[in-house]
Amino acid sequence: METVSFTKQTIDLAASVRARAVVLHMGEVPIDLSLQDRLYKLHDGGYAQTKEYSQAKEELVYQRTSQALHYLDAARKSLQELSEYSRQKGIMLGLETRFHPHEIPNMDEMAELLNEVSESPVGYWHDVGHAEVQQQLGFSLHEEWLSRFKDRMVGIHLHDIFGISDHHAPGKGDMNWEMVAKYLPPGIVKVCEIGEWNDEEQMQGVVNLLQKKGIVN
């Protein structure tokens, strides 16, 4: 499979530069993406508590659930092959919390995939913005991602969020950093994943903020 081949090349590159981990996106379930766009627009417009929003969300969940098994099986097979390859190369793989509801894995799928490779160098990569978006949209709780997978966490992406817009500089949005800090194991990889559109003024104070909140030392 082409994606597996490309990922192996990424693992090779990571090993050559002595990186600790590679973050994996595990695919997606093909749904009507206009339905997902509609959900986002309704949320941004302040209609998250309406019947229209609930109906759009229910239809999205139905479409995803009815097709997910085949794509989850494909992700599982790819992960088995990649986990063995990463073991040979001495690289940890991190399965990332995803942003969009149609992407793999959701919370239960994350547990399944991690259980499949419990003896391999594969762990959970927490993305604070993605987990917060999942909560904002009504799919899963941010804190539950952290509490459920903290013992398998190998790394974290740090950025801030306004509504369902992520990759803002930490400290410039609505993220509950104290809550995040409670669940971070020692020694994990911490990466600020901040959009290139953040200007110099927005970047000022980021490190001090993360230190103050107990995210970094």
Image (cartoon, helix red, strand yellow):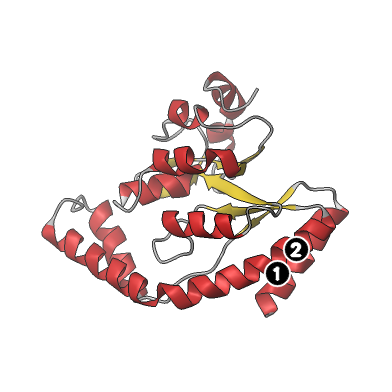
Instruction: Give the amino acid at mark 1.
Output: Glu
Q: Nearer the viewer, residue 205 or 43?
A: 43
Q: Is residue 19 left or right of residue 104?
A: right
Residue 128 seen from this side: yes
Position of 189 with respect to 164 (left or right) is right
Q: Is residue 97 left or right of residue 120?
A: left
Q: x, y percentage for residue 67?
A: 39, 77
In the rendered image of this protein, does residue 120 appear above or below residue 198?
below
Q: Is residue 13 visible?
A: no
**Residue 26 - label:** none
Which quarter shows the N terminus? bottom right
Asked if labels 1 and 2 touch by Cβ distance under 8 angstroms, the answer is yes
Q: In the picture, residue 9 is in which quadrant?
A: bottom right
**Which residue, given by chain and number where applicable, does mark 1 sit on?**
81
Q: Secondary structure at mark 2?
A: helix
* Residue 21 percent coordinates (x, y): 72, 50
Identify which amino acid the numbered label 2 is placed on: Glu
Q: What is the tally of numbered marks visible in this picture?
A: 2
Residue at the spot of label 2: 84
Q: Residues within 10 Å of mark 2 (few under 14, many from 20)?
A: some
Label 1: which secondary element: helix
Q: Categorize mark 1 by other alpha carbons within 10 Å: few (<14), some (14-19), many (20+).
A: few
Residue sitting nearer the eye, 127 or 200: 127
